[in-house]
Structure formats: C-alpha cells, structure tokens
Image (tube, rainbow, N blue to C red):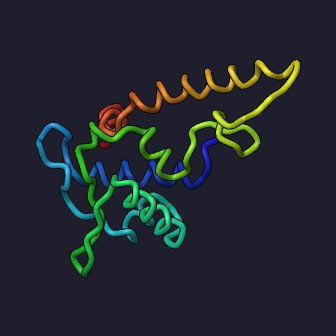
Amino acid sequence: MYVSARADYALRAMLAVADAAGSPGDGEYGGELVKAASLADSQDIPLSFLQGILLDLRRAGLLHSHRGTEGGYALTRPSAEISVGDVLRAAGGALTSVRGVPVDRADYHGVASGLRDVWLAVDGAIALVVDRTALADLLADRAPTA
C-alpha cells in the first residue's frame, strides 16, 4: 500500500472536520462548519490541492458543503460511522495497486501466477485494518493537549 499525499491530506482534513463536529456520542455529527482555508492552515495543506480533495470527499458522500460567508464543511454522518477506508477510497480509489493497476485486475502468467493471490491477500488485510478504524477511534486515541 502506498499512501499518497492526497490520501494523507484527505484523512487529516476529515479528522479536523470530525474534531469540529464534537463528541461522536452526543448525537451531533454536523457540528461546527469548517472553512477550507481554515483546514488548509491548520493541517498545512496547500489550499488549491485541498479544494479538489474536499470535492472528492463531498462527491463520495462523506462531507456536506455549505456556501456563503458562514459556510464550510461538515460530516454527513457521525465520525464513528466513517472509516479510514471510506476516506482512502474517496481520495484515491483502490487501497492497493500493482504497477498502478488495482489488485483485482493484476494479471500474471506462468510461474508468477500465484502473485495475484498474494496481492489480493495483502489488499484484504489492509482493508480489514482501515475499514474497522473509524475517524472517532483516531480522535479518541490522541494524546490530550495541555
């Protein structure tokens, strides 16, 4: 698995929006709207790059966007229901690839034919970890700030 800057930025942005939403157990998941410029500043992400990422996250149904001077971004559902895998797939497609091709489309012949099964197992193991890790888990695991 290769974690691109785009995927890393997407996760960092989603965590910042989730953090602004408040506690995952309080029933609120819209929370405070977070502006793209604020996300870019707080996470040290180039704003022009972040705007494309936010568009992908919105198209994937992970974020709502609200226009206007009071606008910004909010989660579409509680942070406990959004997995790291959801964000990674929205930002970059397949979790694992071989030479830029999704694992399930990798094609091998002869002595190398068993490699596809290995890559599928690797992809499955990665999916298991990222799909069972929610944004709320990552926020709960962080060290308290003093």
Left or right: residue 113 compared with residue 136:
right
Which residue is at the far left? 26
Q: Position of residue 36 (x, y in %)?
A: 38, 69
Query: Is 40 drawn above or below residue 5 in the view shown?
Result: below
Query: Is 139 drawn above or below residue 75 in the view shown?
Result: above
Residue under the point 40% across and 71% down: 37
Is residue 94 in view?
yes
Q: Quadrant of residue 118?
A: top right
Which residue is at the far right? 111
Left or right: residue 78 compared with residue 108:
left
Query: Is 70 drawn above or below residue 62 in the view shown?
Result: below
Camera-nearest residue between 44 and 95: 95
Q: Quadrant of residue 131?
A: top left
Camera-nearest residue between 102 and 41: 102
Residue under the point 84% across and 22% down: 112
Q: Position of residue 67 (x, y in %)?
A: 27, 77
Q: Quick one: quadrant of the N terminus?
A: top right
Q: Quick one: quadrant of the C terminus?
A: top left
Q: Position of residue 27 (x, y in %)?
A: 11, 43
Left or right: residue 137 compared with residue 27:
right
Q: Position of residue 22 (x, y in %)?
A: 20, 48
Camera-nearest residue between 108 and 93: 108
Residue under the point 54% across and 67% down: 49
Q: How many marks?
A: 0
Query: Is 3 drawn above or below residue 119 in the view shown?
Result: below
Is residue 142 in view?
no
Q: Quadrant of residue 79?
A: top left
Residue under the point 49% across and 71% down: 47
Which residue is at the far bottom? 69
Left or right: residue 2 compared with residue 45:
right
